[in-house]
Image (tube, helix red, strand yellow):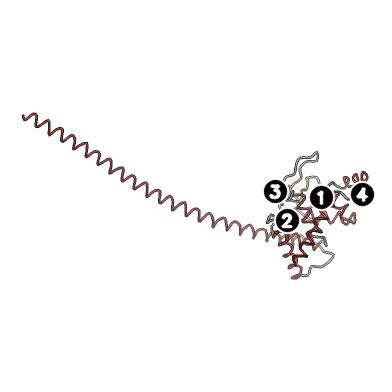
């Protein structure tokens, strides 16, 4: 009888031990669950914080880019000043440049930055050049992308680079003509690219005296222009006509909106 009682007590103790073990496991799991929930909450807080910091950083970066663009424009204007055929008229010309930059920005759906437009307008004024011609040339040369880092398709002469698509064989001497330094990577600087285009167009316009020849020479090269005239008897290439028509349309739109 005693042995039977001992066996029963042994089974009860064993059962209690199992129940106790289960309770311990459940408690540990509950503790781990609480700990995991806390870790998830902390992680979410960190993600929210980093997201907020990232937005602040992005805004700061955008501000720095605008400041850099404006600073580069000002440096170009100060360091590469040339004597214009018609003097700048300070405030009035600045207002005109602002209107042009706004027009180019809106016409390009925001792709042609306002600081680029300001620089283009001021440089065109200094060279007594039609800014709409320059803008339309950039528009066509970049395939309407206004991408400063554009690399043109490979030709037998190599690639063309930047918004205004200069090649390595022509860019250095045009830079020298503008009294600018030259490095290949500078062709991807939008301000440098715009100034090279204006200087080259000024050279071609002074050489030929009309936009048909100047623009066709820009597109085909000086010898290419001569070959075109020899073949067709004129310099009214589709490239030159498209740019001039586009410029006239831009002037009409800008005039109508004033």
| Chain-order first, disc 4 or disc 1 | 1
Which mark sits nearer the N-terminus, 2 or 4? Answer: 2
Q: CA distance from mark 3 to mark 1?
A: 21 Å
Chain-order first, disc 1 or disc 2? 1
- Please tell me how crowded label 4 is: few (under 14), some (14-19), or many (20+) other residues with Cα within 10 Å: few
Q: Quadrant of the N terminus?
A: top left
Q: Is the C terminus in the top left, top right, bottom left or bottom right quadrant?
A: bottom right
Residue at position x 39%, y 48% from top?
39
Whether residues under marks 3 and 1 lie with C-beta atoms below 8 angstroms apart, the answer is: no
Q: Position of residue 144 (x, y in %)?
A: 73, 51
Between 105 and 202, the residue placed more toward the observer is 105
Task: Please provide percent x and percent y for residue 238.
Answer: 84, 49
Q: Which residue is mark 1?
A: 173
Question: Which of the two discs, 3 and 1, labels the residue nearer the N terminus?
Answer: 3
**Residue that carries the numbered disc 4 in the rendered image:** 234
Q: What's the CA distance linking mark 4 and mark 1?
A: 27 Å
Residue 2 marker = none
Q: Which residue is mark 3?
A: 149
First along the sequence among labels 3 and 2: 3
């Amino acid at each position: 009888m005693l042995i039977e009682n001992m066996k029963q007590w042994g089974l009860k103790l064993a059962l209690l031990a199992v129940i106790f073990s289960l309770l311990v496991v459940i408690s540990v799991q509950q503790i781990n669950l609480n700990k995991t929930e806390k870790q998830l909450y902390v992680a979410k807080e960190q993600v929210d914080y980093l997201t907020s910091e990232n937005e602040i950083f992005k805004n700061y970066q955008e501000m720095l880019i605008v400041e850099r663009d404006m600073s580069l424009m000002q440096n170009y204007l100060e360091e590469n000043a040339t004597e214009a055929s018609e003097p700048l008229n300070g405030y009035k010309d600045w207002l005109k440049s602002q209107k042009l930059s706004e027009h180019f920005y809106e016409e390009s759906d925001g792709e042609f930055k306002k600081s680029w437009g300001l620089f283009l307008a001021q440089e065109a004024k200094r060279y007594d050049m039609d800014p709409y011609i320059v803008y339309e040339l950039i528009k066509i040369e970049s395939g309407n992308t206004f991408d400063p880092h554009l690399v043109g398709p490979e030709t037998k002469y190599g690639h063309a680079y930047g918004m205004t698509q200069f090649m390595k064989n022509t860019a250095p001497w045009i830079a020298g003509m503008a009294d600018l330094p030259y490095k290949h990577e500078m062709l991807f600087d939008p301000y440098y690219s715009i100034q090279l285009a204006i200087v080259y167009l000024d050279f071609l316009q002074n050489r030929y005296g009309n936009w048909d020849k100047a623009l066709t020479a820009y597109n085909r090269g000086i010898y290419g222009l001569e070959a075109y005239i020899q073949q067709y008897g004129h310099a009214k290439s589709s490239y030159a006509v498209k740019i001039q028509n586009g410029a006239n349309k831009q002037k009409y739109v800008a005039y109508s909106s004033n």
